Image (spheres, coloured by chain):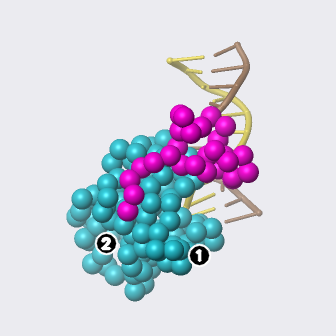
Chain colours: A cyan, B brown, C yellow
DNA sequence: GCCAACGTTGGC
DNA sequence: GCCAACGTTGGC
């Protein structure tokens, strides 16, 4: 089992939006970064646990947990010319972009803020807190996962 | 709203 | 293959 962190802007799609989806499940579309795509395509497995991170908002931080319920498959939002994430270089025969389905597990009792995560020496290896990091999907080690959960 | 950091694009 | 220009991310 692997652990991950995925970012989303709460104004666009926050953890409550996931909670309100049918089956509390949604496809994680719109990722247009090759590194992030490769992780979804190659490394994310059914049952993997994922931190839901709110970015670009008043208090950036980890707000909850979700689970991978469908492994990588073509991101069809790339095929729709009217979609914000349309990519003319991707088509159903040769899909360039990949997504997974995630299911809500829980909302944390409080937001574990980016500031807290940065202050912890134990998390200095976490991609999230490394300078200039812009990945919207990143791996979390088991030790980091447990440490962060213990902060709640 | 600003801007640093970084990925992508495209000319050469 | 280099690298300047450009666009995006995301904290502050």
Disc 1 target residue = A58
Whether residue A12 is visible: yes
Q: Nearer the viewer, residue A76 or B5?
A: A76
Residue A58 x/y as whole percent: 59, 75
Relative height, residue A95 to residue A146 (above, below): above
Is the residue under label 1 in contact with that under label 2 (CB below 8 Å)? no
In the drawing, does residue A129 fall left or right of residue B6? left
- Dot 1 lies on which element? loop
Q: Is A49 included in the stretch rendered in magenta?
A: no
For image coordinates 43% across by 64% down, the residue present is A102
What is the distance, in whole Å, between disc 2 and disc 1 at their CAs? 20 Å
For image coordinates 42% across by 84% down, the residue present is A110
Which residue lies most toward the bottom here?
A109
- Dot 2 lies on which element? helix
Q: Is A92 included in the stretch rendered in magenta?
A: yes
Chain identifier of the residue bearing label 2 in the image: A
For image coordinates 69% across by 53% down, the residue present is A84
Disc 2 target residue = A148
Q: Earlier in the sequence, mark 2 or mark 1?
A: 1
Q: In the picture, which quadrant includes the C terminus of chain A?
A: bottom left
What are the residue bounds of the magenta stretch? A69-97
């Amino acid at each position: 089992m692997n652990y991950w962190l995925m970012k989303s802007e709460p104004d666009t799609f926050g953890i409550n939006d996931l909670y309100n989806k049918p089956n509390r499940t949604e496809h994680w579309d719109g990722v247009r970064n090759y590194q992030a795509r490769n992780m979804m395509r190659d490394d994310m497995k059914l049952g993997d646990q994922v931190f839901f991170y709110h970015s670009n908002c008043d208090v950036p931080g980890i707000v909850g947990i979700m689970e991978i319920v469908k492994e990588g498959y073509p991101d069809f939002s790339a095929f729709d010319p009217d979609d914000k994430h349309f990519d003319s270089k991707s088509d159903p025969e040769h899909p360039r972009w990949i997504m997974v389905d995630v299911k809500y597990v829980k909302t944390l009792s409080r937001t574990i803020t980016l500031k807290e995560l940065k202050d912890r020496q134990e998390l200095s290896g976490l991609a999230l807190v490394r300078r200039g990091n812009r990945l919207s999907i990143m791996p979390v080690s088991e030790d980091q996962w447990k440490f962060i959960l213990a902060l709640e």
